[in-house]
Amino acid sequence: MNRVYPLLEFNDTKLVPNDWKEDYPPVDTDVPVVDEKIYWDPSLKGFNSPRIYLQWTDEQEVVSLPRHSLYLALGKRLVDIVIASLVTIFVLSWMIPLIGSLILCESPGPFLFVQSRSGRKGRPFFCLKFRTMLHSHTPKGEFRQTSRDDARVTPIGRFLRKTNLDEMPQFLNVLIGDMTIVGPRPHAVWHDAQHWASAAYRERYWMRPGITGLAQIRGARGEVGETQKMGHRIRYDHFYISRQSFLLDIKIVLYTLKLTFKGDINAW
């Protein structure tokens, strides 16, 4: 435990001022608000229970929204489209066949992992990743996060997760508008449904979710079952939402690239 929380301090980085402080109400995200098994039903083109639909209200309760700017109104989306297009043409065009072949040679199953996750204002979308775990036909409604030293993670998958390369197909999500390059990370819809009653948690989705974000480069990533750990992630996300800018996005992207080449100790 002592090895984890120092990495989650939200005031020990040049990206966050030391005097930054927000007085949030207590965040209780350990009590589920959904007590039924939830799964996507292709025949219904929806979920098996209407309670999985995350109700959104535009009434602001906790998060501070940023001031209007040309970058937020037009520039951020334009940058997303340009970068995602270049990555798709010059990187994914060869990376998907190459990594996909390695995944298929190592273990049977699809080379892409497609999961329903929450988008802006709680709207679900299908998030793409390279498959990093052994493929199994999971019973409908079963949800299990990846944990440290998870036996389901393959050797290739462990490398992909450590270097963040498993997230590369999400540039396709950015291209079609479901995601942005920098923003709060999207969680599985079932996971969000457990925590949706918390305004602080829910309002992470005022903006499109990102491939990378401030919380991720500061270590608040991976399994998020504990209230304190979730609280750190929420504070990082709220800080970013209220202060997002072109300069901050560049800093986060550069730090993400550094972790990609160095290897992220918080990725497993």
Image (cartoon, helix red, strand yellow):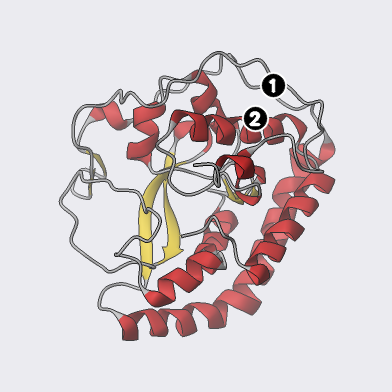
Give the residue at x 79% y 28%: 68
Looking at the picture, how far across and down is residue 38, in whole percent? 23, 38
Looking at the picture, how far across and down is residue 65, in whole percent? 70, 24
Q: How many marks?
A: 2
Side (left or right) of 200 relative to 65: left
* SS at mark 2 in the image: helix
**Which amino acid lies under the numbered mark 2 shown in the image of this protein?**
His
* SS at mark 1 in the image: loop
183 vs 147, nearest the viewer: 147
Q: Which mark is residue 132?
A: none
Q: How far apart are the alpha carbons under marks 1 and 2?
A: 7 Å
Q: Can you tell which quarter of the image residue 21 is in?
A: top right
118 vs 68, nearest the viewer: 118
Looking at the picture, how far across and down is residue 94, in whole percent? 55, 83
Side (left or right) of 39 relative to 213: left
Q: Which residue is mark 2?
A: 238
**Cβ–Cβ below 8 Å for labels 1 and 2?**
yes
Does residue 237 sit above or below 268 in this rendering?
above
Give the residue at x 37% y 53%: 147
Side (left or right) of 108 relative to 178: left
Q: Residues within 10 Å of mark 2 (few under 14, many from 20)?
A: many
Q: Can you tell which quarter of the image residue 31 is in?
A: top left
Give the residue at x 72% y 29%: 242
Residue at the front extreme, as displayed: 2
Q: Which residue is mark 1?
A: 64
Q: Earlier in the sequence, mark 1 or mark 2?
A: 1
Q: Residues within 10 Å of mark 1 (few under 14, many from 20)?
A: some
Give the residue at x 64% y 35%: 236
**Which amino acid lies under the numbered mark 1 shown in the image of this protein?**
Ser
Does residue 59 sit above or below 11 in this rendering?
above
Does residue 79 sit above or below 106 in this rendering?
above
